[in-house]
Amino acid sequence: MADPSSYRPKPGEIPDTPGVYRFRDEHRRVIYVGKAKSLRQRLANYFQDLASLHPRTRTMVTTAASVEWTVVSTEVEALQLEYSWIKEYDPRFNVKYRDDKSYPYLAVTMNEEFPRVQVMRGHKRKGVRYFGPYGHAWAIRDTVDLLLRVFPVRTCSAGVFKNAARTGRPCLLGYIGKCSAPCVDRVSADEHRDLAEEFCDFMAGRTGTYIRRLEKQMTDAAEEMEYERAARLRDDIGALKKAMEKSAVVLADATDADLIAVAEDELEAAVQIFHVRGGRVRGQRGWVTDKVEEITTGALVEHALQQLYGEERGDSVPKEVLVPALPEPVEPVQEWLAERRGSGVSLRIPQRGDKKALMETVQRNALQALALHKTKRASDLTTRSRALEEIAEALDLDSAPLRIECYDISHLQGDDVVASMVVFEDGLQRKSEYRRFQIKGFAGQDDVRSMHEVISRRFKRYLAEKEKTGEWVDDSSQTDLKDASGNDVPAVSGTGPQGASENGLKDDDGRPKKFAYPPQLVVVDGGQPQVAAAKKALDELGIDDIAVCGLAKRLEEVWLPDDEDPVVLPRTSEGLYLLQRVRDEAHRFAITYQRTKRAQRFRSSPLDDVPGLGDTRKQALLKHFGSLKKLRSATIDQICEVPGIGRKTAETIAVALAQAAPAAPAVNTATGEIMDEEEPGTTGSGGDPVTAGAPDERRGQET
């Protein structure tokens, strides 16, 4: 625990101007970012008597080892820089909107020749019109299903669209009238785009004019005795009205606004947002955050605005934002919102009428969200703190293990041996720092030896980072690792754990790293042998300040190095529950990777080694002969009969197949049937022929 006075700047060093400040820990990782109208006055608040600080603020300043700042010209610049750094560094002590998710939007891809209506999540793309967000994807699909009767816009994927164009036959929606079928030229590209524009206009709230136009067409059709057309228009009007009923009118003046409400207690705050477009509630979302320090409702609102509009531009920022309390000062925030929208934005507290009544509804939702969050055991701050304290007490640690890493080995009868590393910080998953390993030091099944290799490789990277900063001198070579996406992470001299170049040492800038920071506790999935292997790996590297334990599945016993008897935590222990969650997550992550590796192996074929033989000719060979077994027994003349295969290529294929050892026959484990005519990896579809009751689905086959 650091003493804040050890790194407190002298009062004269801190400028009395607007700026953004960063607290760093002993590993140079940014742990907190803040902004201030006056840096001198703001930073002075952190260096008071520790007893007078908020508990979370006290933890932050004692975890930090240094503080630095950047001076800016205006408070708007400070707001923009603060948001950028929070997104870049992901500081652990900043307000974090946990329980947020990628909310679904109704999207119309107007950037395509034939616009498509679909559900989209994640980052917004240029040229795509978005409506929402919605609380559930099914709500979007229900709305689209009703509107396709009137606006038969394409909803199919690019693959389905191209296949229909190739065959000249539309999909089912084209046959039942819910798609105008531009794929088979029933309508032109311009006519289809007009349909998409009308769909967007209706979703944007311009509904009255369109319905009145349909009603007039229905009346005209009835007068001309075109009763079938009039009935169809009547049904279209009914579908549109039903779609409109799904989002009731809440503001009579067709307002475009976002309403933000906050419910809070001493430790946490819940934020709820209602998106109102055209006077109707089009979407809802919410977050829950820990309160790191004594923070006002206005400051929480400011953080919510940053989260909500930090990546938005144009009409995605509404003309009006209604909040329960205004940030202090409010002018920089309003100016920042106006810059993102491109025109003025009204940020205010509703005082009376429909808007105040709707704000009360949003507030009730925020209160319910906070109450619901409190009941979630894994996310409750008090419960997490108690779990970490119980682990520290049971394992005789000096302090609570704020960072826990867990390792697991997975294989299938000795093949495709892989390992996983998962990270929990403050009792919560840190998925961005998960890592995956391939066991390269040996072949076969040896969990203990595999664990030793993985721990050695992970902490060699850590020592390499210490060596770079001058904290450690070690000439041991670094080994290749895999990131969470399965990509190679090369070991480059003088780089960070992700192989960053000398010009971009990410750890010097405080960006989140994967291997630069040591855990306080290493957990391995297993008993005494695995724990001993992990401890031996750390001892060989000279690391003696990281605790190690293992959690055995059979009786959920906690094993410590050099102890003959395990530590048995009570079944109701929050600490045991947290260790189980960590272990189970490592097991899940390892098995997922192992299955991916096995699937890739099954998809391989001796034909892959034939130079110049692409996928098209491989499929032609397999289609002609029916299986790899028959191809292997074919003569060169028979191989030459396949279109596109010359004699020289046929000779190369014959040599490659002769040199490759025949694969074991695939077995249908549900029936015991030996599938002679197909071998693993020869179906041409990338599928695994061993499907029913495969060993990977039986518990105990993988470790």
Image (tube, rainbow, N blue to C red):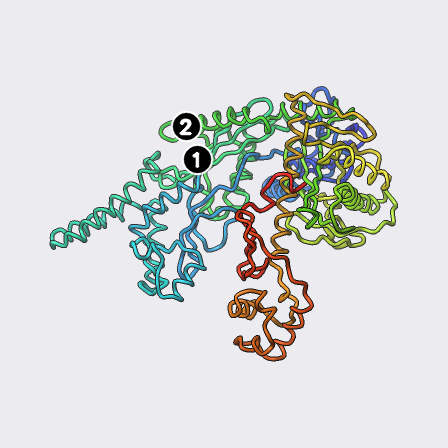
Identify the residue shown where x is 67% and y is 69%: 658
Question: Could you say where residue 525 lies in the image, as x and y percent from the top left?
Answer: 71, 36
Q: Nearer the viewer, residue 522 or 636?
A: 636
Q: CA distance from mark 2 to mark 1?
A: 10 Å
Q: Nearer the viewer, residue 660 or 546?
A: 660
Number of numbered labels in the structure image: 2
Q: Nearer the viewer, residue 372 or 458?
A: 458
Estimate how packed mark 2 is, as few (under 14), some (14 to 19) or many (20 or more) residues with alpha carbons within 10 Å.
some
Is there any visible trace of residue 395 in the rendered image? yes
SS for dot 2: helix
Q: Is residue 262 above or below residue 180?
A: above
Q: Quadrant of residue 399?
A: top right
Write down the residue under mark 1: 274
Tell me, for residue 361, which label it has, or none. 2
SS for dot 1: strand
- Is the N terminus in the top left, top right, bottom left or bottom right quadrant? top right
Question: Could you say where residue 455 lies in the image, as x and y percent from the top left?
Answer: 77, 42
